[in-house]
Image (cartoon, helix red, strand yellow):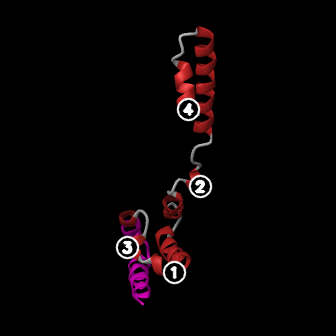
């Protein structure tokens, strides 16, 4: 469809060219509007992680939640925003213990 429309956009007849250009712009806008939604762009886990890190003791909560949600894939090496989770967990009251606990439960 787009190749036929592109051919009509280059038409020598100005009326055909104008209508084809309008249709082409509408199709492009419709495709842009129907693009990826924030829920399906592949970064939902990253946004969830960021939201947890903004909470008090969020890194520890995130580590336990992610492990429970992802089962075998919940290993700390698979965390989105791994460095941020680690740094914030070290500052939390029970962060160092919970990061060690997450590593131990992941090893089994």
For disc 2, the marked residue is: 39
Residue 20 sits in which quadrant? top right
Q: Which mark is residue 54?
A: none
Query: What secondary structure is found at the residue carrying circle 2?
Result: helix
79 on left or right of 35 = left
Residue 90 screen position, x and y as percent: 37, 72
Q: Is residue 73 above or below residue 18?
A: below
* Separation of marks 3 and 1 at Cα, in angstroms: 13 Å
Q: Residues within 10 Å of mark 3 (few under 14, many from 20)?
A: few
Please identify the quarter of the rendering in which residue 32 is found: top right
Number of other residues with Cα within 10 Å of mark 2, as a class: few under 14, some 14 to 19, many 20 or more: few
- How many neighbours does mark 4 have within 10 angstroms: few (below 14), some (14-19), or many (20 or more)? few
Residue 55 drawn above or below residue 19? below
Q: Position of residue 77 (x, y in %)?
A: 37, 73
Quote the CA–CA distance across marks 1 and 4: 45 Å
Per the rendering, the mark at residue 71 is 1
Whether the magenta-drawn stretch holds residue 86 is answered as yes
Per the rendered image, the range of residues in magenta is 85-108
């Amino acid at each position: 469809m787009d190749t036929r429309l592109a051919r009509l956009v280059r038409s020598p007849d100005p009326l055909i060219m104008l209508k084809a250009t309008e249709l082409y712009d509408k199709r492009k806008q419709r495709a842009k509007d129907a693009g990826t939604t924030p829920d399906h762009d592949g970064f939902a886990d990253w946004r969830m992680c960021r939201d947890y890190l903004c909470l008090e003791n969020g890194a520890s909560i995130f580590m336990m939640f992610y492990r429970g949600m992802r089962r075998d894939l919940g290993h700390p090496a698979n965390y989105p925003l791994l460095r941020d989770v680690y740094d914030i967990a070290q500052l939390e009251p029970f962060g160092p213990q919970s990061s060690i606990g997450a590593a131990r439960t992941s090893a089994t």
